[in-house]
Image (cartoon, helix red, strand yellow):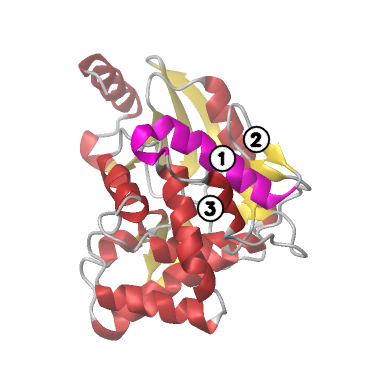
Amino acid sequence: MSRLDEVKVARVLDSFGVAADALLGRGGEARVYALDDDRVLRVHHPSTKRASVDRRNALLQEITRGASGVPFATPVPLETLEREGCIVVLERRLPGRPLLELLGEASGAAREALVRANLDAAARIGDIALARTAYGDLCSPAPLHTKTFREYLETRAATSLRRAGADFAHLSPAELARALPEPQPMGPALVHLDAFGGNMLVEAERVTAVIDFGTVSIAGDRRIDPLAAAAYLDAPITPYATDADRHIAQEWLGERGLDDLYTPARRWLAAFWSAAMDDPTLDRWCRSVLLA
């Protein structure tokens, strides 16, 4: 953010009596601060449009209604305000620490349990009830909806690769899509698409909350999220992950008959994220997967 934007955010925090060191996390859209034991402040960047926040809030409310059968909490928006030119959402505070952070501390059996908990939770995201008959974007300002999942995969990959530039021009979005199956008879399910350790909160080696549903979430094949969770154990996305962690993830996939889908899913995910050139970590990962 610009210096002026930083000043605006500082004023927002002052208005709530929140110190800058109450920061819990930050992303491309917002920063999240602890407000009290029960609530957090999601302070959106000053350039964020109200319509974008409203779409995300509506999706989170739908997820809350459909999440009664899953063993983890999901974000719940409580109130939306505007302060100092910033949109602020008060949300329920969710329990746990980021799994990504805990991987920097754990070892042995506890570490294996964390890796497996990550994939277990990612696999359960598809249990959240979602009333959709078409595949496609759930929170995008210009949503793409298709009758088949492969059509969505191809079109979305083509858009990202085109934006990513000449280095990726030789890749075929159609081939990337054909390498993945249609999810029928399962039909469209909720797919987080960013189900990595930074978006999993953990207590006692159990995922207590999955956070940061939003712009990239889709109605698609529920198998994508555990495959993504395994793929995101790559460096640099998860810098604390080791070869042993990745081996455990591959074992988990093999136990569920998903190992053959790992490489095509990883390549499509890299194509999807390839347009995120302003994120050096993602850009480096996409290039390592698609251009190496």
Nearest to viewer (mark 3 / mark 2): 3
The picture places residue 34, in percent across and down from the top left corner, at 34, 43
Sooner in the amino-acid sequence: mark 1 or mark 3: 1
Task: Report whether 246 appears left or right of 91.
Answer: left
Q: Which residues are magenta?
A: 148-169
**Front-most of residues 203 and 197:** 197
The picture places residue 286, in percent across and down from the top left corner, at 35, 48
Task: Report whether 98 appears left or right of 108.
Answer: right
Cβ–Cβ under 8 Å for marks 1 and 3: no
Say which element carries label 1.
Answer: helix
Nearest to viewer (mark 1 / mark 2): 1
Cβ–Cβ under 8 Å for marks 1 and 2: yes
**Front-most of residues 129 and 154:** 154
Q: CA distance from mark 1 to mark 3?
A: 11 Å
Vertical order, 36 against 198 (above or below): above
Amino acid found under the numbered disc labelled 1: Arg
Sooner in the amino-acid sequence: mark 3 or mark 2: 2
Give the residue pinned by disc 3. Answer: 176
| Residue 144 disc label | 2
Give the residue pinned by disc 1. Answer: 156
Q: Residue at x 30, y 38 (%)?
A: 279
Q: CA distance from mark 1 to mark 2?
A: 8 Å
